[in-house]
Image (cartoon, rainbow, N blue to C red):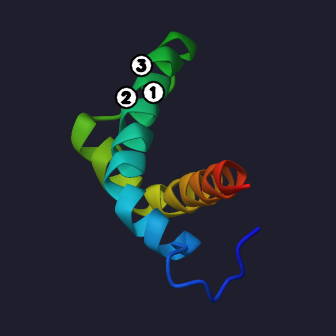
Amino acid sequence: MAPATDPGRWPVWKLALLLYPFAAAAVAINLFMLALMARALDWPNLSPEMALLLSVGLGVPAAWACGRWVRRLLDEAAE
């Protein structure tokens, strides 16, 4: 495994920053779809705009998880 000070090794926070738009979009789609399924249980409706607004905050931990996953895959490929 490469040391953390290796200049060619991307840190998790850079990967998370790069992947944030994709993670936030995936969170928005999943929230909206979950709200559509929850309508069967008579839960309140969630507009697409509200799903996008909620995904701004919820996209951060999702992007961090994606960054960690990609970092692990890159480390595994480098071995």
Residue 8 horizontal side relative to residue 5, left or right: left
Circle count: 3
Question: In the picture shown, does residue 38 fall above or below 26?
Answer: above
Q: Quadrant of residue 74?
A: bottom right
Q: Disc 3 designates what residue?
A: 36
- Considering depth in this image, is 34 or 73 the residue closer to the camera? 73
Instruction: Please state which amino acid type lies under the numbered disc 2.
Output: Asn
Which residue lies at the image location 71% right of the left edge and 51% below the top edge?
A: 76
- Considering depth in this image, is 39 or 78 the residue closer to the camera? 78
State the residue lying farthest toward the front.
79
Asked whether the residues under the numbered discs 1 and 3 touch, taking CB atoms below 8 Å apart as contact, a structural biologist would say yes
Tell me the CA gap for discs 1 and 3: 4 Å
Give the number of the disc on residue 19.
none
Question: Image quadrant for the N terminus?
Answer: bottom right
State the residue lying farthest toward the bottom.
5
* Residue 38 percent location from the top left of the image: 52, 20
Q: Disc 1 designates what residue?
A: 35
Mark 3 closeness class: few <14, some 14–19, many ≥20 residues within 10 Å? some
Mark 1 closeness class: few <14, some 14–19, many ≥20 residues within 10 Å? some
Question: In the picture shown, does residue 44 fall above or below 3?
Answer: above
Instruction: Please state which amino acid type lies under the numbered disc 3.
Output: Leu
Question: Image quadrant for the C terminus?
Answer: bottom right
* Residue 41 percent location from the top left of the image: 57, 15
Question: In the picture shown, does residue 61 fall above or below 13?
Answer: above
Give the number of the disc on residue 45.
2
Which residue lies at the image location 55% right of the left edge and 75% below the top edge?
A: 11
Residue 78 horizontal side relative to residue 59, left or right: right
* Residue 19 percent location from the top left of the image: 40, 56
Tell me the CA gap for discs 3 and 2: 7 Å
Tell me the CA gap for discs 2 and 1: 6 Å
* Residue 46 percent location from the top left of the image: 35, 34
Asked whether the residues under the numbered discs 3 and 2 touch, taking CB atoms below 8 Å apart as contact, a structural biologist would say no
